[in-house]
Image: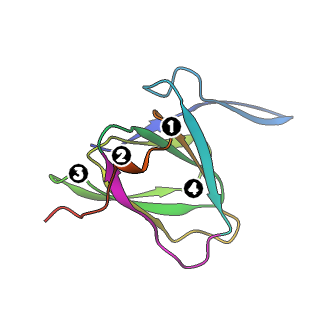
Amino acid sequence: MAYLVDLTTFTDARGNLTVIEKAIPFDIKRIFYIYGVDQSVRGGHRHHTTVQAAICIQGECTIYNNDNAKEEEFILNTPSKCLILNPEDWHQMYNFSPDAILMVLASTPFDPKDYIYEKYT
């Protein structure tokens, strides 16, 4: 089941510093980010083994999630909010603001055999 994690953020007159260490429940094996998205819907899959952590480090986007027991929408609109997506979480990302940058940390390197595109029925 997908869930939100509040990342530790230190704020003072100089700005904000958000820390990811120890907040992610897996060792990071891959990092990618999505940006410059038009009105397209991204994602549309789940995984056999990969766990992911999604952070909208700029702007905002919506992530729809279905774990075959519950459907939810998460709005990511601050870089101190992190969405953990487990392998069973079929997800789509959309409603990207023009300035959105969605960074994703993954527990495994890219493997096309790890992707399951079929929606739950």
As for residue 46 lying within the magenta part, the answer is yes
Nearest to viewer (mark 2 / mark 4): 2
Q: Position of residue 113 (x, y in %)?
A: 36, 48
Question: To which residue does mark 3 refer?
Answer: 67
Q: Callout 3, which amino acid?
A: Asp
As for residue 52 lying within the magenta part, the answer is no
Q: Is residue 87 above or below residue 77?
A: above
The stretch in magenta equals: 37-47
**Disc 1 from disc 2: Cα separation:** 10 Å
| One can see residue 101 in this view | no
Q: Is residue 24 above or below residue 84?
A: above
Residue 77's mark?
4
Question: To which residue does mark 2 refer?
Answer: 114
User: How crowded is the residue under tag 2: few (<14 C-alpha within 10 Å), some, or many (20+)?
Assistant: some
Question: To which residue does mark 1 refer?
Answer: 109
Q: Callout 4, which amino acid?
A: Asn
Nearest to viewer (mark 3 / mark 2): 2
